[in-house]
Amino acid sequence: MAIPQELLDTICATLDTSDLCAAAPVNSAFYHATQRELYRHIALDSRNIAAVFTLARNPRLARHVRSCTIRLSSSSGLLRSFYRVLATAISNMSGLSSLELFADQAASWVLHNDQSYPRLKRLVCSFNLDHNVTRFLNNSDAINELEIDSLPVSETTTFDLRDDALSHLSQFTGSAQAAQVVVPGRPVEHIHLNSGDLTEEVAVNLAKSTLPVLVLGAATSSHSVSLIGTLTQCMERLVHLRIVTTYNFTDAPDTVSPISPISSPSAPFSHDIPPDLFRQHCRRSNVASRFAKLRDLGAALDIIQKELPRRSFQF
């Protein structure tokens, strides 16, 4: 009597690589079960690229791959002919649920194919948002986590991202410019900007997500209090906010006398400020009332944790 495939897969899932290789010759059923397990999760770098050729030559094996991590050093000297093989391998891996691809920036064309990826939930790549990445995203409707390179998008770049693409996207990491292309009109709740400036205009555009933004991390050269005022208007449901600012606070107007100017731009809220006066500043600027539900302050004054007990700021 034939062993059910589900039972074979359960058995193979408990075996290590050497045991899987030993079990493969038992019979055809074990052979196919071990192949499914051996190729389910693969991690490749410049030292073990042989598997790329195997996956390119054998689409049946490539369809077993569920998660794939590829890290190719820019100094590895790989030729364009290898990247053509890599493009074929990626096209063959139609059952992917997670893809991490770190390669030469100029090789984004390896993602340019007509294959659909109905199971792909997570894409992390070292490419910026160009027409090749956009085409890949149009074929991957199930993605809910996207991370692309922090390089800003060229001003001359045109985007063909379908309006209904990425309809399940909940997390985005990338440049502020790319975020303004991807986030509006999609249900993004977690946003991390790893380059670019979070201005009030950018914040308003990001708030066009179809679901409330809950987590936001970014860098800004704007006055933090002014920016936070905008965020309270357009992102009322924020649970965690982390802002790294380059604003020169020594030039900021002192709105609450007699608070002296902050000496260090890297520490916009300092323990040198008297707590009572800081409370007055919070009340007068309406920050405390608007963010009364923030939970955990993190790197700012302990006194704000009493003012803002249920949400979080980090500066």
Image (spheres, rainbow, N blue to C red):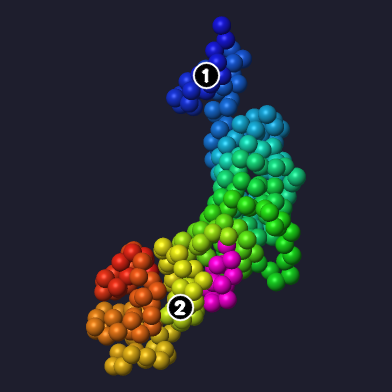
Task: Tell whether position 196 is magenta.
Answer: yes
Say how many tags the image has: 2
- Marks 1 & 2, CB-CB < 8 Å contact: no
- In percent of width and height, residue 201 lies at 58, 76
Q: Secondary structure at mark 2?
A: helix
- In percent of width and height, residue 271 lies at 26, 79
Which residue range is magenta in the image? 195-209
Residue 147 versus residue 303: which sits nearer the camera?
Answer: 303
Q: In the image, is residue 55 above or below residue 74?
A: above
- According to the picture, the residue beneath numbered tag 1 turns out to be 8
Q: Which residue in the rendered view is the most extreme toward the top? A: 1
- According to the picture, the residue beneath numbered tag 2 turns out to be 229
Q: CA distance from mark 1 to mark 2?
A: 59 Å
- In percent of width and height, residue 79 lies at 70, 49
Q: Residues within 10 Å of mark 2 (few under 14, many from 20)?
A: some
Q: Residues within 10 Å of mark 1 (few under 14, many from 20)?
A: some
Visible in this render: residue 48? no
Task: Tell whether position 218 is magenta.
Answer: no
- In percent of width and height, residue 92 lies at 69, 37
**Sequence order check, earlier mark of 1 and 2:** 1
Indicate the quadrant where residue 51 lies: top right
Amino acid at the residue labelled 1: Leu
